[in-house]
Amino acid sequence: MLMALSQTACSQGETETGEETAAETEAVSAETEETRLTPDIPETADYNGDEIRFLHWQHPEWIGSIRDCRDLDAEALTGEAINDAVFNRNTYVEENYNVEIVLENRSIHSFNKDVHTAVQSGDNTYDVVYPILLYMNELCIGGDLANLMDVPHIDFTKPWWDRNAVQSMSIGGYLPAVASSINVNDKDATTAIAFNKQLAADNNLPDLYTTVEEGKWTIDLLREYADTCNVDLNGDGTMTVDDRYGFLGGNDVIYAFYYGSGQLMVTKDTDDMFQFTYGTERDINVTQKVYDLMQEDWFFNHHKHTDTSDDFYRILFETGHGLFYWMRLDDVTAMRESDADFGILPTPKYDEAQEQYWSVLSPYTTGILSIPVTTAGEQLEEVGLILEAMAAYSHYTLIPAYVDESLKTKYSRDEQSASMMDIIMENRLIDPMMVYNFGKFRDEFIQFGNKANLSIASTIQQKQKSVDQDVAKKSESIMAFAER
């Protein structure tokens, strides 16, 4: 929406000579201000100092890192864009509605059990919970999460709620979780590609940003360029971490590139019910293409190395050991102190016939907003209003701070990466398969790249029945709870 407003301002504000008058500038500014949407809630209310308590997942190994929760609480203004946007948002909401926003983090190893135990005992201590996507299905199936469609004051037609998340996460009208402008953690978990600009220049590659904008950035083109940069630097005849690869990746590439084709494994029927539809000719062709890519000598799979840490893998890219680098957007911030001159690209398309680029949220590094069923009655109405206020305020403050000041300006290395960031953020996917792991197919699919002589068609044939049965079983459990 902000991009459209900017383009409208440019077209309406220019005279025939390309100059803009003061009157036109004022008119455009007024139009832009009027277009800013406001939530359909009271501007103020007095909730007598109530605490709005958030419980957020936390990985013990990521405490204090960029993957730790940084979008729900800020103690003071520090001059850092995201921190200050969070602080100002919370201050605005707390003062306007006389509430206190409280955050508690909980290890992913005990999170689901603790939430389930609290719900079963009727404990309503926590108003909002953020389970990690990887394990969220346990709470959905267990009947622990409220239907967000029924929460007063939340308006999913507004732009501060992620429309793709609403569409993919709902089942039979029941919505257990959603992404929103309240958070940047899910944006950090969005997959993308970085490239080493010096290596691209040394190998006479064309302007990759132009390639993306022309719709020509595809898996085949990535393969072609990656092959030109594979070099056995030490001349020992074996590719090791001391050499240079065309593509630094991991097991995640198989699902990131599959979803980059715009396909989903689990879709909806006319009743908004899940159905396993993976296995079309295009699905198999896409998967085969990515699988073949991952078998190339120039593909470095860091999950096959003795050190599988993301830090080790990222440093390989920072030190010039790869032309392309599969990443999540949190890596852009993680590389802020690096001397590496890199650019940012969306996940490549399957082919040029594909209409647009797509990105997927990694289930390993993010969670999205949920409300436990113990938040009910007047408490639920209050929480709904506060969440709507937080989301609306964040949409025009926190998200611009994240995208414009952090990713586009402060941490990325060039202006062109800014337009790439818009493409990446515009179309993001969450597949129910990534959340519910039907028939454990998610886990198996992510390991496809490690299999020798993989036959995708026969694998699907073997798994179809068990996946379909699990879809039916989990859907029945969810709807039995949702219909109560």
Image: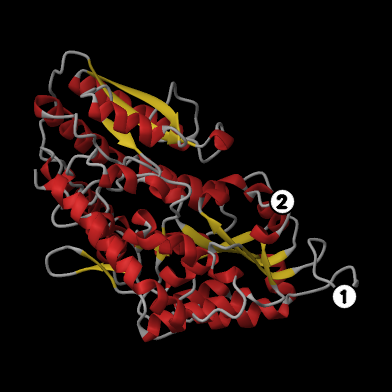
Please name whichever residue, 234 or 173, is drawn nearer the observer in this view of the structure.
173
Q: Which residue is mark 1?
A: 237
Q: Secondary structure at mark 2?
A: loop
Give the residue displayed 56% in from the left and 31% down from the top.
64
70 horizontally vs 178: left or right? right
Q: Which mark is residue 307?
A: 2
110 horizontally vs 267: left or right? right
Split into 4 quadrants, where in the image is the N terminus? bottom left
Measured as percent of width and height from the top left, residue 167 is found at 22, 59
Q: Residues within 10 Å of mark 1 (few under 14, many from 20)?
A: few
Residue type highlighted by circle 2: Asp
> What's the distance in space between the residues labelled 1 and 2, CA to CA?
22 Å
- The answer to whether residue 13 is seen in the rendering is no
Measured as percent of width and height from the top left, residue 457 is found at 44, 82
Give the residue displayed 41% in from the left and 56% down from the top.
361
Please name whichever residue, 182 or 400, is drawn nearer the observer in this view of the structure.
182
Split into 4 quadrants, where in the image is the C terminus? top left
Residue type highlighted by circle 1: Gly
For the rendered model, the colour scheme is: secondary structure
Quarter-of-image position of residue 97: top left
In the image, is residue 44 above or below residue 129? above
Q: Residues within 10 Å of mark 2 (few under 14, many from 20)?
A: few
Q: Which mark is residue 184?
A: none
Please name whichever residue, 288 or 380, is drawn nearer the observer in this view of the structure.
288
**Is the C-beta separation of discs 1 and 2 under 8 Å?**
no
Please name whichever residue, 203 or 457, is drawn nearer the observer in this view of the structure.
457
431 horizontally vs 219: left or right? left
- The answer to whether residue 98 is seen in the rendering is yes
